Image (cartoon, helix red, strand yellow):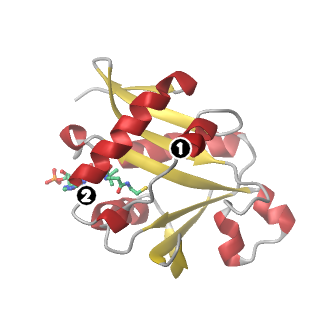
Amino acid sequence: MEFLFQDLDETALGTLLDMQTEAFLYLSDPDFLRKNSEEMLLSCLRPPHVCIGAYHKNVLAGFGILYFGEDSEENLGHLLSFSKERLFSAANIKLVIVRPSFQGHGLQKTLMLLLENRAKQRGISTLLSTVAPKNQFSRRNMILSGYQSKGIYQKYGGLQRELFCKTI
Ligand SMILES: CC(C)(COP(=O)(O)OP(=O)(O)OC[C@H]1O[C@@H](n2cnc3c(N)ncnc32)[C@H](O)[C@@H]1OP(=O)(O)O)[C@@H](O)C(=O)NCCC(=O)NCCS
């Protein structure tokens, strides 16, 4: 299956919200994902953040978000007690969603690689991401993409999240 990768902007907000809703309908466990608010998704579609979409015949099959948390609470580097300087050289792979009908084509790995290249261009040296420990598909893709587990943390109101880290 062929995909065309393209940066998404604010005009994609409605589609991203629909895809997030669809993802929750298909999840075997709702704790796998943290629901992002409309406001948060909108900010992800605005600079400096990067959202790359994978299109198949004009249908958005999947998307991935690179989030520059800088020194805000969103930066996962706080979990590893990064210094302020290090926080600014770290970014989050915040969310990847692939529509159920397009799963199984390695899109999560491809999207993360494209986001990694973009992060490098911006001077980022550490990528961080959290995954629900039971989310075997995402965990596997993190490990295959060269991320290392940094342990399990309580996040988002008590949910367990495994922190993954990659030096790029
Ligand atoms: C995690 C996710 C992005 C992976 O999608 P993907 O990149 O298309 O998955 P892969 O190409 O690595 O799939 C590998 C195998 O797992 C299967 N698979 C992937 N996700 C699956 C899912 N959610 N449910 C059941 N099977 C799934 C694929 O069909 C494929 O099977 P095959 O080897 O028999 O063909 C996708 O499952 C998803 O969007 N899940 C909901 C959101 C989520 O959990 N995101 C990650 C946290 S941010």
Amino acid carrying label 2: it is Leu
Visible residue check, residue 66: yes
> Mark 2 vs mark 1: which is more N-terminal?
2
C-alpha distance separating marks 2 and 1: 20 Å
Q: Is residue 38 above or below residue 149?
A: above
The answer to whether residue 141 is left or right of residue 66 is: left
Q: Where residue 63 appears, x then y in whole percent? A: 42, 38
Q: Nearer the viewer, mark 2 or mark 1?
A: 2
Rendered residue at 42%/35% (across/down): 16
Q: Which residue is mark 1?
A: 65
Rendered residue at 53%/80% (across/down): 153
Q: How many marks?
A: 2
Q: Is residue 141 above or below residue 103?
A: below
Residue 123 bears which disc, if any? none
Q: Where residue 14 appears, x then y in whole percent? A: 44, 29
Q: Secondary structure at mark 1?
A: strand
**Dot 2 alpha-carbon crowd within 10 angstroms: few under 14, some 14 to 19, many 20 or more:** few
Single out the residue that lies furthest toward the top: 58
Visible residue check, residue 106: no
Q: Quadrant of residue 140?
A: bottom left
Amino acid carrying label 1: it is Ile
Quarter of the rendering occupied by the C terminus: bottom right
Marks 2 and 1: CB-CB under 8 Å?
no
Q: Where residue 138 appears, x then y in whole percent? A: 35, 60
Q: Quadrant of residue 73?
A: bottom right
Q: Which residue is mark 2?
A: 27
Q: Where residue 20 appears, x then y in whole percent? A: 37, 44
